Image: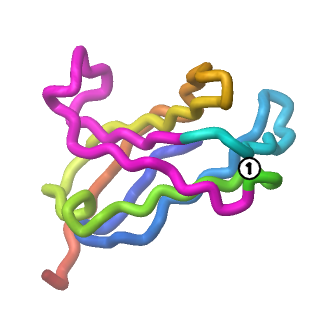
Amino acid sequence: MASISRYRGDTAVDRFTVKDSDGAVINITSYTFLLTVDEKKNPANTATQVFQIAGTIIDAANGIVEFEPTTGNANQDPGTYWYDVQMIDPDGLITTLAKDEYIFVQDITK
């Protein structure tokens, strides 16, 4: 996965397609997902966490999950933050699917 860049205040979804190490799509029926944004790349705890969003499975058979930020989530100071996406399978096993920059760019319309 790659960095995410969005204008401050925009609430468009972040969409991911979950694939295995060979690039094949994973059926994500009964899985859960979390996208967490933090001020730090490697936080020691949740003290610098900016927000966390539960994923919504859009198409389980094709591995598609979306994260829809609220207005409050999207209204951050422009700058570079960090995110990761975790997948929890039906047995409770956690896999981090992505970790990268989450960039808020200054908008014009307030």
Count of marks, rendered view: 1
Query: For this view, does 25 lie left or right of residue 12?
Result: right
Question: Where is residue 107 drawn, in percent x and y?
Answer: 22, 74
Q: Is residue 82 above or below residue 9?
A: above
Please name whichever residue, 11 or 101, is drawn nearer the observer in this view of the structure.
11
Locate the N terminus by quadrant.
Answer: top right
Please name the residue shown 33% across and 44% down the image.
Answer: 52
Q: Is residue 78 left or right of residue 62?
A: left
At horizontal 74% and vertical 49% (from top left) the residue drawn is: 63
Q: Nearer the viewer, residue 71 or 28?
A: 28
31 relative position to 59: left or right: left
Q: Position of residue 105 (x, y in %)?
A: 26, 62
What's drawn in magenta, residue-wise?
33-59
Whether the magenta-drawn stretch holds residue 45 is answered as yes
The residue that appears at 22% across and 19% down in the rendered structure is: 45
Q: Quadrant of the C terminus?
A: bottom left
Residue 70 sits inside the magenta stretch:
no
**Residue bearing the label numbered 1:** 63
Name which residue lies at 80% across and 54% down. Answer: 62
Please state which amino acid type lies under the numbered disc 1: Gly
Secondary structure under tag 1 reads loop
Scheme of image coloration: rainbow
Residue 71 image-quadrant placement: bottom left
x and y percentages locating residue 44 in the rendered image? 23, 15
